[in-house]
Amino acid sequence: MDSGASTLSLSSSLELQNPNSDPYEGSFVEPSFFQTQTGVPTQFICPKVDLVNAHEELMEPVVDLEGFFRGDSVATQQAATIIRAACLRHGFFQVINHGVDSRLISAAYDHMDHFFNQPTSHKLKARSLPGNMWGYSGAHAHRFSTELPWKETLSFGFHDNSLDPVVVDFFTSTLGKDYQQTGVVYQKYCEEMKRVSGVMMELLAISLGVDRLHYKKYFEDGYSIMRCNYYPPCQEPSLALGTGAHCDPTSLTILHQDQVGGLQVYSNNTWQTVRPRHDTLVINIGETFMALSNGKYKSCLHRATVNSYKARRSLAFFVNPREDKVVRPPSDLLGTQSTRMYPDFTWSDLLQFTQNHYRADDATLQNFTKWLLSSKSLI
Ligand SMILES: C=C1C[C@]23C[C@H]1CC[C@H]2[C@]1(C)CCC[C@@](C)(C(=O)O)[C@H]1[C@@H]3C(=O)O
Ligand SMILES: O=C(O)CCC(=O)C(=O)O
Ligand SMILES: [Fe+2]
């Protein structure tokens, strides 16, 4: 942790292990722990969690993309109108008829099951090393020491370049040639997510009344993050969370959840559950897009609960701009009203903040901008 830069007292500061040591050496949670435990160890307990009042189901129209793909301008405008209302309210909506082959989604889950059901020693071949977000993590125990998430994750990067199959390379280089097919499946899955993200960027631009291609072009050369989330059953699900309450620091998240259920969105001052639908992609606004919309669109506060009977899986694709691009709202959005809600920053700055100084929560952007301004004033 760069202590020189973290002069602020942050509400949710990172409790990092020594970044120079083996991330799993001496860490109190062995990833195999999920399969053997009968209770919830204190490191996982979320004391302030209110899981009781979260039975309400989020009711909202689902956005049908069929008309957009047909080039129907009325249907496209209707989709943009629904998206605008949802993003102003809570930064969350769902889409159907997105064109992603259901067999590809099933294959992504099958390969995920295969990996997470391997012995710990095998999964650790792909373990996430300090300062690097790619790889396998068991409860993020190598990074944090309290309110650990009841999950295992596998994360890797993606950029659009057919000459450079980064995802296939990630799998074969960390886990060996046996993972070639897994790499091919996830390479294709990420390409599809990138395609859907382009559609979303067009619809978001229309909904904000800016140049239709502005955001699509802005994100074209970005480096996205793909994460497979695996939530093992938990004997006391009221004590722990799969993923704690947070807003994604990234720009836009495209998530597919399996049929088990557990995703909740904070809306109308209450936690509301998002009923799983296998043909639906869940889209949420992240902190970086909130800044790109000059604070108009809300970044979505959400979390994932766990249950005692069945493992849950989700596939999250986080869209980002190229790391060095300046995050600034388009001029046609600012118009004559030039009051900026956030200072200029780069995705690289915000990513570094969440990886080295601050555990992403519901106030990441707010604390990041304070940190940015105070570190600039030190120069
Ligand atoms: C840039 C990122 C940080 C996190 C992974 C990506 C996008 C979402 C962030 C995260 C999921 C928000 C909740 C906390 C977190 C630690 C997690 O539970 O996984 C976050 C990710 C992270 O820092 O690894
Ligand atoms: O698993 C889910 O449904 C949500 C996961 C999530 O919020 C995340 O990975 O950022
Ligand atoms: Fe999230």
Image (cartoon, helix red, strand yellow):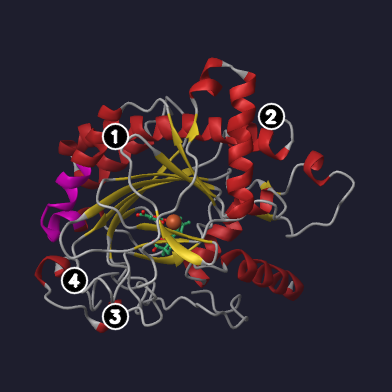
Above or below, comparing residue 154 to residue 18 in the picture:
above
Mark 1 is surrounded, within 10 Å at the Cα level, by few (under 14), some (14 to 19) or many (20 or more) other residues, namely some
Can you tell me which quadrant of the image ligand 3 is in? bottom left
Q: Secondary structure at mark 4?
A: loop
How far apart are the two marked residues, 4 and 3, measured between alpha carbons? 12 Å
- Report the Cα–Cα distance between label 1 and label 3: 33 Å
Element carrying mark 2: loop
Secondary structure of the residue carrying tag 3 is helix
Boundaries of the magenta span: 111-123
Q: CA distance from mark 4 to mark 2?
A: 48 Å
Q: Earlier in the sequence, mark 4 or mark 3?
A: 4
Percent position of residue 295, x then y: 69, 55
* Marker disc for residue 212: 2
At 17% from the left edge and 46% from the top edge, which residue is drawn?
113
Q: Amino acid at mark 1?
A: Ile
How far apart are the alpha carbons under marks 1 and 4? 30 Å
Q: Residue at x 12, y 52 (%)?
A: 118
Residue 362 in the image: state x and y as whole percent: 53, 67
Residue annotated with mark 4: 30
Residue located at (50% from left, 57% from top): 248
Q: Which mark is residue 105?
A: 1
Q: Mark 3 and mark 4 in contact (Cβ < 8 Å)?
A: no
Which amino acid type is shown beneath numbered disc 3? Answer: Gln
Cα–Cα gap, marks 2 and 1:
29 Å
Mark 4: which amino acid?
Glu
Between discs 1 and 3, the one toward the N terminus: 3
